[in-house]
Amino acid sequence: MKILQLLASMSVIALAITLTEATAEEAPAADASFALPQSKINIANCKNAITKDHPGFITRQQELHRSGKAYFLYEVMGTDGFEWSLICDIATGKLTHEQKLDSE
């Protein structure tokens, strides 16, 4: 009886290995269609620039389109106790404008 259970377990394991190998062979290669759109590539650079210059918490992120260019508007509650409004050029990943907001 134990031999039958052992053989059944081995069959299940062999089938699982076979299915795993078949799935790996059929998996499509990385495709450029899964890459971020060009307008989104520098989002991480924008966030890094913002947190470097104004450490704190990002409370708002909004994509803006002006004069054919794309920007991100961020509002940050800084660790300095002030709220900041920052605009980052998505094409370059650099801050273009910054303004300290009134606390009132």
Image (spheres, rainbow, N blue to C red):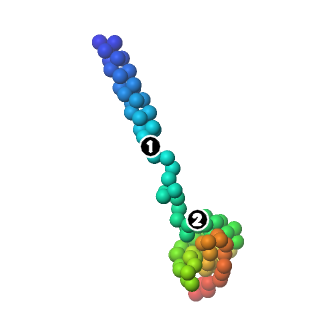
| Front one among 85 and 8 | 8
Q: Mark 2 belongs to which amino acid?
A: Ile
Among numbered discs 1 and 2, the one appearing first in the sequence: 1
- Residue 25 in percent (x, y) is at 45, 38
Quarter holding residue 59: bottom right
* 6 in relation to 87, above or below: above
- Check disc 2 and report the residue beneath it: 41
Residue farthest toward the left in the current orientation of the protein: 1
Determine the residue positioned at 61% across, 78% down. 87
Q: Quadrant of the C terminus?
A: bottom right
- Residue 45 in percent (x, y) is at 64, 66
Determine the residue positioned at 70% across, 71% down. 53
- Residue 96 in percent (x, y) is at 66, 79
- On the question of residue 56 being in view, the answer is no
Q: Mark 1 belongs to which amino acid?
A: Ala
Determine the residue positioned at 66% across, 75% down. 95
Disc 1 versus disc 2: distance between alpha carbons? 26 Å
Crowd band around label 1 with a 10 angstrom C-alpha radius: few (<14), some (14–19), many (20+): few
